[in-house]
Amino acid sequence: MALIKKEVVDQIIQHADIVEVVGDFVDLKKKGQNMWACCPFHHEKSPSFSVAPKKGIYKCFGCGKAGNSVQFIMDIEGTSYVEALRYLAKKYGIEIEEDQSPAAVQAQNEKDSLFILSDFAKQYFVNALHKNDEGQSIGMPYFKQRGLSQATIQKFELGYSLDSWDDFTKAALEKGYQLKYLEETGLTIVKPEEGKQYDRFRGRVMFPIHNVSGRTIGFGARTLKSNDKKSPKYVNSPESRIYHKSDVLYGMFQAKQAIRQEDECFLVEGYLDVLSLHQGGIENVVASSGTSLTENQIKLIGRYTKNITVLYDGDPAGIKASLRGIDLILEGGLNVNVVLFPDGDDPDSYIRKVGDTAFRNYLKEHSQDFISFKSELFAQEAKDNPVKKAEAIREMVVSISKIPDAIKRSVFLQRCSLQFGIDEQVLISEYNKIHLTEQKASRQQSQPSSGYMPSDEELAEAEAAAAAEAEMYGAEDQQEVDQHNTLRNREREVIRWILNYADKEVDEGLTASQFMLGELEDVEFKTPIYARLFDMCRLKLEQGFFPTATEFMQHEEKEIRNEVIDLVSEKYEISNGWATHEIIVPHESDLVTYGSEREVLRLKWRNVQLMIKEQMDGLATLKEDQEVDKCLRTIKTLKEFEKQIADMLGIVISR
C-alpha cells in the first residue's frame, strides 16, 4: 500500500487548523481561550465539547472523545488515518506525494479499478430502474408496493438488473472494463470450460452496499419471480478485495451521523427494514443483511455508539439463532437492548402497518435490556422443568460472563437471581467456574511444554480465591485498591506537569521537565501508561529536546495520543469576573516551581507508603530473627523518610 511521506503528514497537521476543521461540522462558540459546543458524538444539552486552538486539540468532557484535526475527521467520518489525511490535504490544497513501490502502485490501481467498476454497475442498475421500460414496469412497482418514496429510492441508490443473460456484462466490456475485474467483483460469472460469461444479477431489484465512506463495494439483489422455486430469493456479491461481508453493515454510510447524534444504533435483519425505518425518520438503523453478526461489525458500530437495540420479529427460532451474536456484542463492551415485535411482523411490516409515531412509541415502551429479555425467554421455556431451568440459568450466566464491566455483571447477576428465584451466590460461583475455565484454557495455550505445572486442584483453589476477591472487595482489599488508585493519580499528575510545563524554568538554568525527571530518576512508575510516558519524556530530554505534548499527540498508538490529550486538556477556565473585581487568581502556570517540587514530593511519599506496606505484609511470613530484625530496621528507615517528606508537604502523620 502507498504511504504518505512523513514530511507531507507533518505539513498537513501543521496547516489543519482545529477550529476550522471542527467548525465545518459543529457550531463553535468562544468562551475564554477555548471554543465550546454540544458534542457531535453524543446527545447533551449543555456544551462539554471543547476545542483548544493553541494546543490544536478537541476534548469532550462528557463522552471522552479527544484528538487533533486528523483524529476528529477519523471520528466524525469513520475513516482510516490515511483517508483522514487525504481529506485534510484536499481541504488545504496540499499535494500528497506518496512513497510507492511498483507492487504497491499496481495493488492500489487494481483496487481502484474494482471501486470504479462497482460504481459503474451501481449507476447502470439505477438507470435501468428509472430509464428502462422493464425497470419502470417491473422494478419500480415493487419498491412502490413496499411503500418506498422516490426520495428514499434515490438516497439509497436502489436499482434494477434487466432480465437478460449478459446485458450488463456486454455494456461493461464495451466501456472498457476488464473481464477479470467483472469476475472478481462477482458482477459477471465466467465459465471458461464452457466459453461462457453471464450476469450474476438478472431480473432483480438491486440494493447497493456502501462502505463507511460511501463507496459502492457490493450488491444485494432480490428476485421478483414468485414462481421460480430454483433461484434463491436473495443473491449477494461474493467476497472481493473491496468487499468483506463480515466487516460491512447495510445502511451504515447513511446512518452513521444519526447514530452519533442519537447515541444509539438500531440493528435489524434486512434491507427493507433499514429503508422503511429510515423513511419513517428513524435514521440510526443498520442491517446485518441476514448474516450472523461478527466481531468486526460490532467494532464498526462501536465507533459511533456504545448502545445497540436489536429489533426482532416474533419468530422464536430466529431469536434463538441470533443469541450468539448478542453475546458477542456484550463481549465487545456495548450495551444491548431488545425490542420484540408481534408474531408475524418485522420492523418493515410493522412500521407500515402502524405508522411512524406509533412505531416510535412501541420502541420506547417495549425496549428492555438483553439480559432481562433472555431471562424471561428462557424462564418461559423452562417453566416447571428443573433440567431445562438449570440449563437456562447456565446459559444466562454464560451471557453475563461476556460483560467486561464488573459492576454491570454484578447488577445482571442480581437480576437473574430474582428472575429465576435462585440464590445469587450460586450464580456467582457458576460465573467463577466459567471465568476460571477460560483462564485455564488461555494459560495452557501459552504454557511451555516442560517445567512445573500446578495441579487442577491448586489452580482452582488459587483462582477461585482471586476471582471471589475481584467480585467482592473486602475492607482491606478496598483500602489497597484506594492506595493504588492514589498512586496512579500521583503518577498522572507528574506526567501532566512535565508535559504542560516541560520548558518552563523552575530554577536558574533548570526547567520543570529537567528537575522532575532528575528527581524521579530512581522511582519506578507502577501504572503502565505513565511508566511508558515517563520513559518517553526521559528519552526526549536525553536527545536534547523538551518533552512537550505536541509530538506525543501524533503518536502512532491511540492510547498514547488519547492520554496525552487528556493530560493537557483544561475543563475549566478562570472567569473574567475575578479580574473585573481586581481579584488576582493565580493559574498553576504561575506557580511552576512550587507545583513541580510538590508533585515530586507527593509521588515519593505515596511510593514510600506502599513500600512500608509491602514490608509490613512480608513481616508475618519471616521466621528467622535476623530477617525480622532487618525488616524492622527497613520499616523504621522508611517511616523516617516518610515523615521527612510529610514535613516538607505540611502533612501531619497520625501514629
Image (cartoon, rainbow, N blue to C red):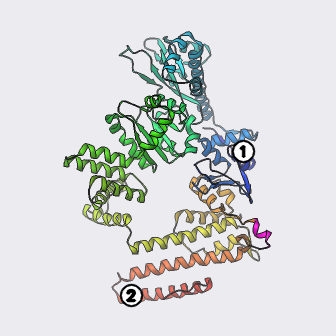
Helix, strand, or loop for circle 2?
helix
> Mark 2 or mark 1: which comes first in sequence?
1
| Residue 196: % across, % down | 47, 12
Q: Which mark is residue 8?
A: 1
Q: Are marks 2 and 1 in contact (CB under 8 Å)?
A: no
Q: Which residue does the image show at 55% across and 42% down from the upper left?
A: 259
Comparing 158 with 541, the one in front is: 158
Q: Which residue range is magenta in the image?
A: 576-582
Whole-percent x, y for residue 69 in the image? 68, 48
Vertical placement of residue 478 versus 442, above or below: below
Identify which residue, 122 or 634, lies in the foreground: 122
Q: Give me the disc on residue 633.
A: none
| Quadrant of residue 214 within the rendered picture | top right
Q: Position of residue 331 (x, y in %)?
A: 42, 49
Would you say 22 lies left or right of 612 here?
Answer: right
Q: Secondary structure at mark 1?
A: helix
Q: In this orientation, which residue lies closer to the viewer: 372 or 516?
A: 372
| Left or right: 396, with 599 as reference point | left
Q: Amino acid at mark 2?
A: Val
Estimate the spatial distance between the alpha carbons at disc 2 and disc 1, rounded to whole Å.
63 Å
Which mark identifies residue 628? 2
